[in-house]
Amino acid sequence: MNTPTDASKEIHALLAAFYENTDDAVLITQFASDGSWDNVFIGANLAACDLLGYEMKDLLKLNPDQTLFSNISSMLLDLIKKRLIEKKRAMLEIELCIKDRESVVVEVKSALVEVNSKQYVLHIIRNIETKKAVQDEWLAERNRTMELLDGIQAYIIIMDRSGRIISMNTFSEEKTGYTADEVKGRVIWEFLVDEEQQMSFKRTCQRGLKQEENHESTWISKKGKRLSVQWSVSFLKEGETGKGFIIGSGIDISQRRQYEENLLESTQKYRSLVEDNPDGIVVFSEENMLYLNKEAQEILGCPSEMARRDSLFSRVHPYDRDKALAYYKGMISKEDFSHNIIDVEVIRPDSSRVTVEVKGISRKVQGETFIHLVIRDVSLQKKAESDLRKMNGRMENILSSTDEILIGLCKELRVTFVNHSLIKLVGQKEDRLVGIPGQALFDQLSETGGNQKPIHLLKLMSGSDPQEIYVLQNGVRKYFEVKVLSLGFDEGALVTMYDITDRKLLEQQRGKYYDAIACGITVQDSSGRVLFANQNAEEIIGLPKDKIKKLSLENHKWLLLDENGDELSLKEHPWRKAVRTQKEIRNFIMGFQHPQHKSLKWILVNTRNVLMEEEDRVEKVIATFQDITAKVEMDKMIKEKEKLALAGQLAAGVAHEIKNPLTSSLGFLKLMRDADVINHDYLDIVLDELESINLVTSEFLALAEPEAAREEDILLFEDVLIPLVSSFKRQLRECGAEIDFRMTPSRQELRGVKEKIRQLFLNIFRNSLEAMPGGGTIDVSAIREHKHIVVRIKDEGVGIPPERLKRLGEPFYSIKEKGTGLGLLLCKKIAHEHRGTLVIKSVQGRGTIVEVSLPVTNRK
């Protein structure tokens, strides 16, 4: 016996053999957790190669999206992938592009399966070109059937489950005097059936929901004429939904009943009428057929002599014989009784089959029971009913029940239909509205609302945007959005009026709220067109709202500046940047100047993006902005004062740092001049003092170096820290120190000047080494915090007292004997230039920690 593992292998082998030998094309892709599949197929069978026209090796290189779904929208493709994740399967019919051939219509069934914790998508593709052709042929056949139904001389009425009429054929209209439009939505037995027979007729229709039922009843035409109708009902179910239609078919038996009664009185007198009757007539006794008229012989496919030799039930199909026998027994058990109609299938002598509608009448004459059958070939009718059962879609009467106003227009643009919503709005009867020109109706509606932009039907029909209109109803203003759908050159149009009153009132109220907000607000679409501006936007920009709404970023007459005072490119404008990056812009400072205005204004801008439904694309950008012109000007004044103060402080410091060693040098040089002897000790002192002056000027020049330099992409560890630590090891060994370098994140990219970043960390390493004259360990670590990399350098020096720590970074303040303080100031300047920070933490007796935080450009 096979083990479970063996059985599993056999199953896998069977499945593999199935997919290799099936006529359906099979393609396999791997599915990622983010809802995407690989860029190539990972498996396919030979049928897929045949269908797509590729060799296997070439097929496995194709992109699944471009190969299978190039003819559908990205939104539909996203829905398919979403359905795969939720339902594990999806199916659709698409037009597939075939290599070097015309495209074909295929059915694609996709299933999401999981194997060894990996997800795969199995695509099974079937060519349904033939199926589509069959469907087209069926649609043509259905249209011919509908034409045939109108040509059938029998009642055919389609109803919903409650008996409300959906449609009826031309014969029914002619007989009842009602048009299909007049009876649509009315319950059939409430107006068409004789009052005494209404309940029995209703029960017949209700029983017809479960099985086919027959009923003979008297109908009342529109003109009051009484009609005898033999009625048959059956229920057409739509799929598994339980919904469907009641299909009723019947024949007018008024004349036939009269004829049957006269026939019993005088067979000979009406023999010719019976013989030529369009319905088949059969008379039999004790299961033996005694008489068949011409139509009956035609229906049964045999002459009267042949039929009289046969038993009554010999021609009935075996599966209908029990029904026919029960019907026969019912007739002979009661005297002078007319029975319901039944349908049976009859086998003709030539083996062809025909569906026959049978109506039986039993009479006793001189003690012998005679059965009179009236038969009719209903094969075409049954086929028509069968086709109706296969029809997709529901014929619903939605026009009169919707709250949306609907107006039908003929090709001359006259009103042909209005629903109850319009009647309620205008307070006029339907007959007063139908027939008038559509343009006159809308002119009338516009006049009730007062002065407003008129509705032009022809313009709306040409494809222009929907137009708004307001109408007074009982003194209350109602707002509507008007759309016109053209139904074709000769078909007229359908006008819809959607009530947007609540939306308009909300917009008006919201506009008041927006105007009360202290900042400017604008809404722009993805093309840059301003859709909305509040009162404060008008005041800040200096233009009225109607002119603001005409603004566009493409207007280059505006002067736009960034926060540094440089010209702002359109690419970096907050709106365009928000659309391009699909990210919200925070605290963006920009200046602008209208060509007609002399003053330059500064604003602080924040944006919020409105994304399109089911698409990751910006539809609108909402911008809020504040006038910060006064603040910017004040900040400039403060910065100028700070620069002047700093310049004075630096000048005094440089003068002091240079004057002391210069005074000492001059003194020793004078001593050597007076002694007329070169003293090497004096020269060493002079050289040391000049070196101090050189150090001060070098650091001062480095500090004063312009910020502009060529930036590049830098790998912080690989390009800066690792080479720097390697070159620093010799100095560490000479001082008896070591460095512990821990690099947790790798490949941290940043944008900047590599030499400056190297100078920043070199100065910090030197300070840490000088803080440990007796040796120790410099601990270097790095961690990722959001979009920054933080490098932490910790030494084991004596630490810095709090009162001295807070002064670090001031020019010419240093805790070292010969320090100038400019080195640390330079480090802070470099960190600031690279949009970073430098923080010093120290505890006396425990060492010092320097943290450098720099922004990185790569993701984690």
Image (cartoon, helix red, strand yellow):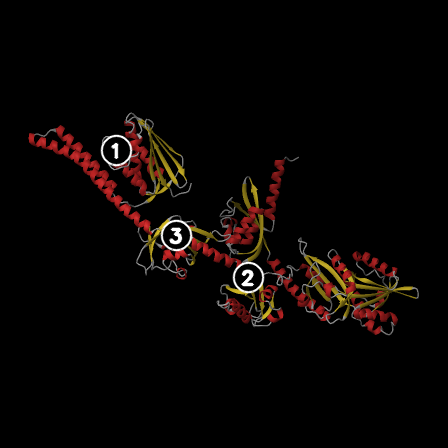
Query: Gap between marks 3 and 2, in whole Å?
Result: 35 Å
Residue identified by numbered label 1: 814
**Residue 498: which numbered mark, if any?**
2
Residue 489 pos. (x, y %): 55, 70
Q: Residue at x 61, y 38 (%)?
A: 8
Front position in the image: 555 or 260: 555
Q: Is residue 434 above or below residue 765?
A: below
Q: Is residue 492 visible?
A: yes
**Amino acid type, callout 3:** Phe
Front position in the image: 234 or 578: 578
**Amino acid type, callout 1:** Ser
Q: Is residue 291 left or right of residue 466?
A: right
Q: Secondary structure at mark 2?
A: strand
Q: Which residue of the protein is positioned furthest toward the right in this rendering? A: 366
Give the mark nearer the N terminus: 3 vs 1: 3
**Residue 625: which numbered mark, if any?**
3
Front position in the image: 662 or 844: 844
Residue 153 pos. (x, y %): 73, 69
Quadrant in which residue 271 is drawn: bottom right
